[in-house]
Image (cartoon, rainbow, N blue to C red):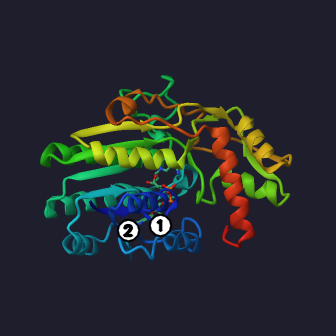
Amino acid sequence: MTILLTGGAGFIGSNVAKQLLLENHRVICLDNLDDYYNPDTKWKNVQRTLSDPGYHFHEGDIRDAELVDTLFQTYGFDAVIHLAARAGVRPSVQNPALYFDVNVNGTMTLLQAMQRWNVHKMVFASSSSVYGDSPNVPFDESDTADRPLSPYAASKRAAELVCHTFHHLYGFDIFCLRFFTVFGPYQRPEMAISQFTDSLLNDTAIQVFGDGSTARDYTYVDDIVRGIILSLENLNGYEVLNIGGSDPISLADLIQLIEQAVGQNAQINRLPMQPGDVQQTYANIRKAQQLIGYQPSVRVEEGIRRFVEWYRASQEAGLVTN
Ligand SMILES: NC(=O)c1ccc[n+]([C@@H]2O[C@H](COP(=O)([O-])OP(=O)(O)OC[C@H]3O[C@@H](n4cnc5c(N)ncnc54)[C@H](O)[C@@H]3O)[C@@H](O)[C@H]2O)c1
């Protein structure tokens, strides 16, 4: 398949690109290397696959309809894997308009290009944050998910709805995958696991928001990549699917796992809960198991061990740019 991969220079996207190329797909990556975190890190991610003849990189914005049209015309895509977004819950509280512009209008630009160029398949990266503080735990795709707590979460839910409209009007096959806190090699540097690991390795204090009781359903990036590819292969109609580890742990337990993997105790600087943060996330993955045969394979303990090993090696090789 020839696939348009938006956001392919990012954490999840660069891991997806690597796997798609291994499976002999052609990958055209569109990413504007935005400044949400250091663009050098993204450029290093791109370099993991740049020499592969099946990989093409275009630096540009998903909101640039002319550029998007040119790419559709040039490559004749079979499908779109749409990961480009302003990610991150807390910064969205400061800049809601930007989050809506990129995450909703950007998605609309791609859907319109699909309509013009007769491309009918999309896998869209949604988020567990759409559930807000839902009392129905574990979170199920049949929940209404109409009480998002941050502009980021609202923008992802809005984009899911726009995807449904295009499915209804034009018969597109679209899977909206709700990822649950993703971690692993090439992780975004501002995410908690990266920050904590970096602080422990460099003997500085970690910043912990809240009393440590918040819980997250951490999902190893290889399992997310598998969920995306399985969706692409089994795509039919419009579906919303949870892709999670389905095994949540508290923030306090997460810190302990990182301490064990690094072999160093954390110095904790405790701060209040942040606006927009939810108390817990927990994926019910029965639907993904049934529809695409998704099964998480890396438990959080093993994933943290692998991440710390990767982070240590990258730091020693001078590849970490925070
Ligand atoms: N990492 C997680 O825990 C997580 C959880 C749920 C959902 N998601 C979603 O998965 C996707 C990938 O997340 P990630 O963690 O790899 O984030 P990331 O920030 O590493 O990747 C996103 C990429 O999109 C690019 N981008 C941003 N705006 C763009 C634009 N206007 N045009 C083109 N490219 C643009 C960025 O440069 C970046 O490389 C995002 O849609 C995110 O919302 C991630």
Residue at point 39%, 31% (across, down): 289
Amino acid, disc 2? Cys
Query: How many discs mark residues in the rendered view?
Result: 2
Residue at point 83%, 53% (across, down): 205
Label 2 residue near ligand 1, CB within 8 Å: no
Where does label 2 land, which residue?
29
> What SS does tag 2 mark?
strand
Amino acid, disc 1? Ala
Instruction: Decide: is 237 above or below 42.
Output: above
Q: Circles 1 and 2: CB distance less than 8 Å?
A: yes
Q: Position of residue 282 (x, y in %)?
A: 53, 31
Q: Foreground: 73 or 150? A: 73
Image quarter of the N terminus:
bottom left
Quadrant of the rendered image containing residue 286: top left
Residue 88's tag is none
> What SS does tag 1 mark?
loop
Label 1 residue near ligand 1, CB within 8 Å: yes
Instruction: Decide: is 284 above or below 198.
Output: above
Side (left or right) of 230 relative to 12: left
Residue at point 67%, 39% (across, down): 301
Whether residue 72 can be seen here = yes
Instruction: Decide: is 140 above or below 202.
Output: above
Q: Position of residue 214 (x, y in %)?
A: 66, 34
Q: Residue lying farthest top?
A: 136
Where does label 1 land, which residue?
9
Whether residue 270 can be seen here = no
Q: Position of residue 257 (x, y in %)?
A: 74, 40
Side (left or right) of 264 relative to 237: right
Give me the C-alpha separation between circle 1 and circle 2.
Answer: 7 Å
Q: Foreground: 30 or 64? A: 30
